[in-house]
Amino acid sequence: MKTVFMVAEKPSLAQSIAKILSRGNMTSHKGLNGACSVHEYTGSFIGQSVHFKMTSVCGHVMTLDFIGKYNNWDKVDPAELFSKAPTEKKEANPKLTMVKFLQVEGRGCDYIVLWLDCDKEGENICFEVLDSVIPVMNKPRGTEKTVYRAKFSSITDTDICNAMNSLGEPNRNEALSVDARQELDLRIGCAFTRFQTKYFQGKYGNLDSSLISFGPCQTPTLGFCVERHDKIQSFKPETYWVLQAKVNHEKESSLTLEWDRVRVFDREIAQMFLNITKMAREAKVESVSKKEKAKQRPLALNTVEMLRVASAALGMGPQHTMQIAERLYTQGYISYPRTETTHYPENFDLKESLRQQTNNPYWAETVKALLSEGVNRPRKGHDAGDHPPITPMRAATEAELGFTDIMPWQSIPLEESLPNCEKGDVFPVNEVKLLEKQTNPPDYLTEAELITLMEKHGIGTDASIPVHINNICQRNYVTVESGRRLKPTNLGIVLVHGYYKIDAELVLPTIRSAVEKQLNLIAQGKANYQQVLEHTLDIFKRKFHYFVDSIAGMDELMEVSFSPLAATGKPLSRCGKCHRFMKYIQAKPSRLHCSHCDETYSLPQNGTIKLYKELRCPLDDFELVLWSSGSRGKSYPLCPYCYNHPPFRDMKKGMGCNECTHPTCQHSLSMLGIGQCVECENGVLVLDPTSGPKWKMACNKCNVIVHFFENAHKVRVSPETCESCDAALVDVDFNKAKSPLPGDETQHSGCVFCDPVFQDLVELKHAATRHPMHRGGQGRRQGRGRGKGRRPGGRPNPKRPKDKMAALAAYFV
């Protein structure tokens, strides 16, 4: 029996599709990567009985990056990134071992059916999957077709079965357009970002951003926000006057009349009108006209409009909205949420979609009325040829998640009710006065307004718009104010003004819009991938060189707004070269600066830094500092110089004393390392000598923390090792009054993993951390072999404890 291998984009999608196609008659098991399941069943395929295997990836399998040495900011000229620097496809998430997983499950299969999302990104992932699986599949006979593509827009029985019965092929051109966008964004973004980050962070201390990033879409997005800010700042209010009259109607109520002329900007003319009218005692109705207000039916919902409505009506950010929409899609509540189309095809069954909502507790009556009275089809919109508009596929109550009856933000606001009156009616005048007012500046852009501008000017795609908006927030270029208005920060304003001063096309939407059109032509097979890539990179390479040569223009603006390094920060620790105090600059990215040597030293981010007991590094005489993520997290000492200039070949930039391989330094891994981490592959649990009396050891790679020997007077790592697991022994000294040791003993030496005396004194947790570099894996991994080799300083590498791994795992939080 032949085997059909099927791959979806997410684990939940794979389960839903397999359940529909197998009619629930399937078996499931976890894959080797622990993240994806495999669902198996028997069925019919192209007229023969076959064995189906359905699984998934977790988004992109591969990501584009520069080869190793070109990722070193210090050794590579950013200008080389435009053409000289080779790129390679790397696994997007190495911990998932997705390529190996796909090859293991796809080995020996005869056919492959790709159920990736039906957009350009999905087509690109199709070919990433094929590159992994085709080499291990059975070879086709002659011209036999073995690769199939399923096209679907919702997770319903009808849509999935129709897709299975009308399989096509993956679209190579659409995949190439994504490849082109990835390479352009990587090369252009990295070159500009590296140059301006190093240049400005090397001069100014209070930029408060760890990365001064540039992006071909991100920067024009920021430009729209700053353009509105500039209009607000340059706005000059004008004084104007309004004539206001109030008349009495009925007994105790009054009615305010609006001036037909609205307003005048000349005080004398306004006074003249007041003089004419203030003597009047009565107001006579000259004519009566009635007008009925009607609101156009809304267009069918596409992605951009969904983002606008969610921001304006629900107060949700674009990225959060897309995350929720994707979850609703995978759970079968709505159709595919990435679409540019706002027009339903003539044969689309709107009544069937409505019938799914007849039991909804909120709008069931409205739906039933529509079905009985007849459905008035939506306005004719734009057909982009991708997916149908976003449509509800089944009912959901508020407990399950989360026309104007259903969309209250679309309704017409209630106006003040007017009294019934006829032509010739007379009302007594109560008051006539002149009001002095001023014109108001425009407000900052809302997210909804920004999304509209991005769509209008062709900046980004329906899928990437939320990412670009999120990026300018994350980079501290704008802040989100009340009403989800985007207010540029000082840094965002200076950057945009600097781009305008040097090369306005770097921030204007025109050039990126033109690039997007070329990428769409690649997707349609009307433009050559390589030619578009080379032509665009050549344009931006020229712009980059001009930008570098003209950077002084932007620097002049920076000087006005930000403080130089030498004038920023507070004295903290002594430099090992000049022995003067270096200043600690707390604003992002936090760092130390020696104004005498004119040297800047990077530090670990997202934590606190303080002087470490005035102790010095034995290699360079720099005073050590202590980094901490908080009382519930990790902490470790580091030498500022070694952290930036690794002293040994087996060390990398950014390593603290807990990873230093110095053989005799009292703060190093060699002297404080205890045993191999019970969770991650390469980490070592290192004693935190500052943690007493709540002692702990922490992994120097992931976020595992082991609390032990609370209230001990002293904890020391012994030079001796455990005979069972090769972990370093620990010497513990308790005060007599607080000793938990048996027989009123106050001292004990043993292995934290194997010694039964220590068994109840050890507790495993995860660090409370805010930084991805300290996060561990997705859960405890089992069945690993014992570690081999030698540790620095002559101590053997500890073996992974066998039974203790399970015992410690019981304490996971």
Image: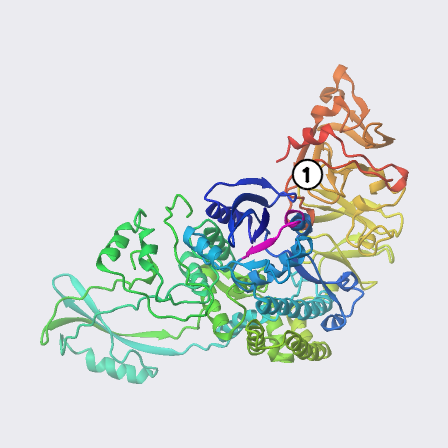
Q: Quadrant of residue 601?
A: bottom right
Q: Is residue 266 visible?
A: yes
Residue nearest the observer in this picture, 175 or 642:
175
Q: Is residue 60 located in the magenta-colored stretch of the structure? A: no
Quarter the C terminus occupies: top right
Q: Is residue 444 visible?
A: no
670 w.r.t. 453: above or below:
above
Residue nearest the observer in this picture, 144 or 403:
144
In magenta, the rendered stretch is 104-116
Q: Horizontally, is 811 left or right of 413 in the view?
A: right
660 w.r.t. 64: above or below:
above
- The x, y position of residue 750, in whole percent, is 81, 26
Q: Is residue 113 located in the magenta-colored stretch of the structure? A: yes
The residue labelled by disc 1 is 781
Q: Residues within 10 Å of mark 1 (few under 14, many from 20)?
A: some
Q: Quadrant of residue 518?
A: bottom right
158 w.r.t. 271: above or below:
above
- The x, y position of residue 14, in whole percent, is 53, 49
Q: How many marks?
A: 1
Q: Residue at x 47, y 61 (%)?
A: 484
